[in-house]
Image (spheres, rainbow, N blue to C red):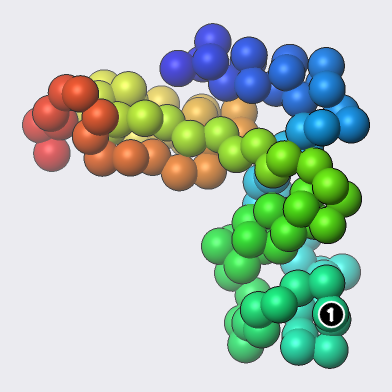
Amino acid sequence: TLEQIDVIKRLIKAYPNDLQFADSSESTDNMKISSDNPSYPITFGFYSERAVLLLSIWDAFNAGKIASLIAVEGGHSIDSRLAVLRIMAEAGARYLTLTHSCNTPW
């Protein structure tokens, strides 16, 4: 999984005119989320990581690029260890599917 995350990041760097990394690591301090902003067709009454992730997807769309999100396919990828999940999140993964082709013990 970590090698796949590396490949995604290298692809984004190799094709910056076409791909844009979409994550929620940006600070929400400078973001204004409101219906007054015509760039974003959705109004949020709160700041959340999910809202910021959605805004980064819209930013890519508005720039004419493909929003590239990093996901971990299958809970078995973390081997039932939250430390591995935290490391993958630091590497840029923003969501984890519970199962893909293997079951998880949890």
50 or 35: which is nearer to us?
35
Describe the element under mark 1 as helix, strand or loop. Answer: loop
15 or 94: which is nearer to us?
15
Residue drawn where x is 87% and y is 50% of the image? 63
Residue drawn where x is 73% and y is 18% of the image? 11
Location of residue 1 in the rendering, given as x and y in whole percent from the top left corner:
45, 17
Can residue 81 be seen in this snapshot?
no
The answer to which quarter of the image holds residue 76 is top left
- As drawn, 92 above or below 26: above
Location of residue 22 in the rendering, given as x and y in whole percent from the top left corner:
69, 44
Label count reads 1
Location of residue 13 in the rendering, given as x and y in whole percent from the top left corner:
82, 21
Q: In what quadrant of the picture does the C terminus appear? A: top left
Give the crowd class for mark 1: few <14, some 14-19, many >=20 residues within 10 Å.
few
Residue reaching furthest to the top: 3
What residue is shown with label 1?
Answer: 38
Residue reaching furthest to the front: 64
Left or right for 34, reference 4: right
Left or right for 84, reference 58: left
Query: Type of residue at label 1?
Result: Pro
- As drawn, 8 above or below 61: above
The answer to which quarter of the image holds residue 47 is bottom right
Can residue 41 be seen in this snapshot?
yes
Location of residue 61 in the rendering, given as x and y in whole percent from the top left corner:
76, 53
Residue drawn where x is 72% and y is 40% of the image? 66
- As drawn, 47 above or below 71: below
- As drawn, 48 above or below 44: above
Residue drawn where x is 76% and y is 79% of the image? 33
Left or right for 31, reference 67: right
